[in-house]
Amino acid sequence: GENVEQHPSTLSVQEGDSAVIKCTYSDSASNYFPWYKQELGKGPQLIIDIRSNVGEKKDQRIAVTLNKTAKHFSLHITETQPEDSAVYFCAARGYSTLTFGKGTMLLVSP
Amino acid sequence: GAVVSQHPSRVICKSGTSVKIECRSLDFQATTMFWYRQFPKKSLMLMATSNEGSKATYEQGVEKDKFLINHASLTLSTLTVTSAHPEDSSFYICSADPTGQGASTDTQYFGPGTRLTVL
């Protein structure tokens, strides 16, 4: 089955800095890669996703890149703000269900 | 759009009792819903895939007689934790696929989660 590795497990940045979270996946058949933000005590919220026919996607301060050859994808957050502090999960999906990474706790200090 | 709700948001029960958690898609239909369990500071663990009008598909190691799933309509799936014990205490989250196709590129939207505490 699919295996998704996510790094780093924790990331601390200063407000205004950029943050990058990286994920790798094992199943070359995976073709859908969403990113979720989860705040304490809440369910995951979809923040951006990318499909295998696209190499990069951007939505305001958030961008995701995908390298299908290398089987890795990354989340980029620019101009970070304290409200960006949360746990971020990457995921990959092929023919079956979503497989999640272990999560990255992002801490943005004012 | 694509809002998923869960009820209750928090429940405390005594050991040996059963607890039902509801998952509803509010503005779309979903032939497929998913149930996850999440331990503190851990990732989401898929428990089962809920299919409208048919039996749920359980992941390996998940007891189907312990975690009963009923997907009675296109907007409602329920998870019943039977004879709950303290080790069943966890954060349970559902998600739904708004296109209902279950195709590989479909987006999943998550509910807000239910915190279950078994005393």
Image (cartoon, rainbow, N blue to C red):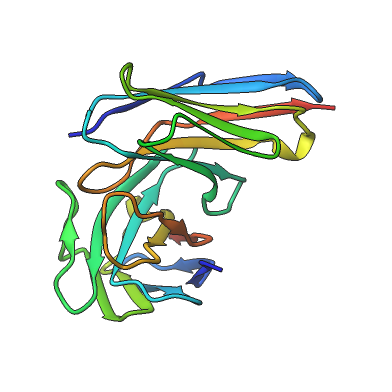
Residue closer to the observer: A3 or A95? A95
User: Residue furthest toward the bottom?
Assistant: B73
Question: Residue placed at 63% from the left, 38% from the top?
Answer: A86
Q: Position of residue B84 (x, y in %)?
A: 31, 64
Quadrant including the C terminus of chain A: top right
Left or right: B90 as drawn, with respect to B112 = left
Vertically, is B18 above or below A14? below
Question: Residue placed at 50% from the left, 77% from the top?
Answer: B27
Residue closer to the observer: B15 or B60? B60
Q: Is residue B17 something one can see in this rendering?
A: no
Q: Quadrant of residue B70?
A: bottom left
Question: Residue placed at 40% from the left, 54% from the top?
Answer: B107
Vertically, is A21 above or below B6? above
**Number of marks in the rendered image:** 0
Question: Residue placed at 32% from the left, 22% from the top?
Answer: A71
Q: Position of residue A56 (x, y in %)?
A: 51, 30
Q: Position of residue B6 (x, y in %)?
A: 48, 70
Q: Quadrant of residue A3?
A: top left
Quadrant including the N terminus of chain A: top left
User: Residue furthest toward the right?
Assistant: A110
Residue closer to the observer: A19 or B71? A19
Q: Is residue A73 something one can see in this rendering?
A: yes
Q: Position of residue B110 (x, y in %)?
A: 47, 58
